[in-house]
Amino acid sequence: MLMLPKIVVQIVRNILIWLGLPMALVAIGDHWLAPLFPASEPLQMRWLGNGLMLLAFIWGLRSHLLLLQFSEPDGYLRLKPRRLIQIGYYARNRHPQWWSLQIWLLGALLTAGLPALVLLILVAACLLAGSLYLVFIDEGKLIRQFGARYIRYRGRTPFWGIKLHAPAAKEPTWVYQFAWLLGHILFRWNYRITADGLEHIPSYRSFIIVARHASYLDPFLFGIFIPFPVHFVTTADAYTHPLKQWFMDQLYTFPIRRHVQDLAALRKIIKLTAEGKTVGIFPEGERSMDGSPGEIVPETVRVLQRCKVSILPVEIEGAFEIWPRWSNARRKGKVHVRFKPVIPVSATADRDELTRMIRATIFPEKVTYHPVRTKRIAKGIEKLLWGCIACGTTDTIREIGPDAVKCQVCERTWRLESDYHLREADGARIALIEWMSRLQKQIEPAQESKAPSLSDGEVVYLHSTLEQYRGPDADTVNYQGAELILSDQAFIIRHDGREQERWRHGQITVCTVDSKDEFSLGISGKRHSFRLPSPEHPLKWHNYFKHITSGDT
């Protein structure tokens, strides 16, 4: 909070420089210099002056944002940079902020309509004074601060002019800069984000960040502390519209398809790290439903080994609580980010050991929930609670108030408290994760009297009418009204008493919950989606499948 007055001072200083200095130069030119020279016609080039001022404003604003965003590892808006910026405009010129100010002053003087000789004298004086200060004072400070790194940077980056061929100048985009600024303003203060372990963030760019995935906001919650643009891997489902795809591209995210082995995305990760870029990966592959750690995708570990770069583990506390996956409403709470010691390249050789290290660093030893503030904390929780732990029925929990749920069969009620514990009327409390664990223990085959009969002793666990089936091909038959069955051996679609489709568990690579009424299977490298009728829970089918294939049955 102590930084706020300093930021205000910085804003006031910049306003005085960018507005006060042109006004002072115009006054000097009009009242002191003009009478000293023969009268001459003023330059009527306001259109050019306005254009130069607009160009200078954009140039200066983006250069200043670069310093704010990437010069300090703790994400605060510092007055003095603590890291050497070598991307964006700083890859083309060593002092883009100063040059933008010179162009701004030139535009202001042209707009003021001063005589040509007076304008030339003022511009020359500004260039001379600024150049002498930068060369003999400011650059000396930078050399003392950054040493050999700044000397190398000075050798390849011009003071006068612009370096045309500079690949690093392409980063970051306007969208990325303003998304960072808005995220900093909206999220840093709104969620009171704190961080420790900042000293573990590498000073070089080529490394991979791994973090647990609990909320849509995860990239913003810790990305504000990374002093480099981060290329995040995200699900291909986010690229459903051309405008949305353009926006995601501007944020340096790139898609990976969860239901297939997406070789193109894996090659993209390897290519980015080889080019010296920073990549962000969520090794679980999807957001947690109840805040508990998920399984680390084996393909992700193999990619980490192939990249042969350092790995920065990040643990985030409070992300699930402020925006749980089952709700479309954010809540107010606290978030704490921990940057763990870097996992060196030498420690990535053994796959099992690398997986263990990642789990030990990004997942907490015990899941605990932090209190949040919201007017309707139970909103959307029906998507999560697919069963009642009191009577053992499924698809019976309903929201009956802003903070209460009720089983439609046994009629017991629970109040969801601010720390995600469910309290029954008699005062007994149970954490959300414990509720879900109890449901896992209640998984058992369907009653024989209600289960459809299958041959060869195949055991039925779940069965339901199928609202819709979408296969990987556009001309796939829509099995609306057919029966979907989950047995101990396969997923089955049966229509008019005849088996239409059968996918054995060994063919299924992934099962994901897509929405409140839909889940998907990755089968032989292709996606198959199933929409269920209300009140069926996709999460119930997901959990049953995981339980059956885990060998615990």
Image (cartoon, rainbow, N blue to C red):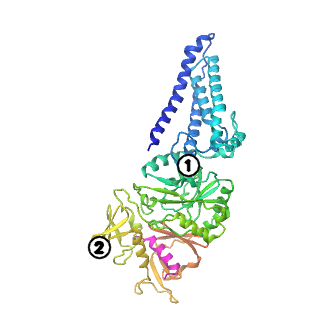
Q: Position of residue 354 (x, y in %)?
A: 61, 68
Report whether 491 appears left or right of 116: left
Task: Name the image quarter holding residue 69.
Answer: top right
Q: In the image, which is nearer the foreground, mark 2 or mark 1?
A: 1
The quarter of the rendered structure image containing the N terminus is top left
Single out the residue that lies furthest toward the bottom.
Answer: 456
Residue at label 1? 73
SS at circle 1: loop
Vertical position of residue 271 compared to residue 430: above or below = above
Span of residues in magenta = 534-553
Give the numbered dot on residue 411: 2
Dot 1, crowdedness within 10 Å: few (<14), some or many (≥20)? many
Q: Residue at x 42, y 87 (%)?
A: 448
Q: Residue at x 36, y 62 (%)?
A: 378
Task: Name the image quarter holding residue 373.
Answer: bottom left
Q: Residue at x 64, y 26 (%)?
A: 127
- Which amino acid is tagged 2? Glu
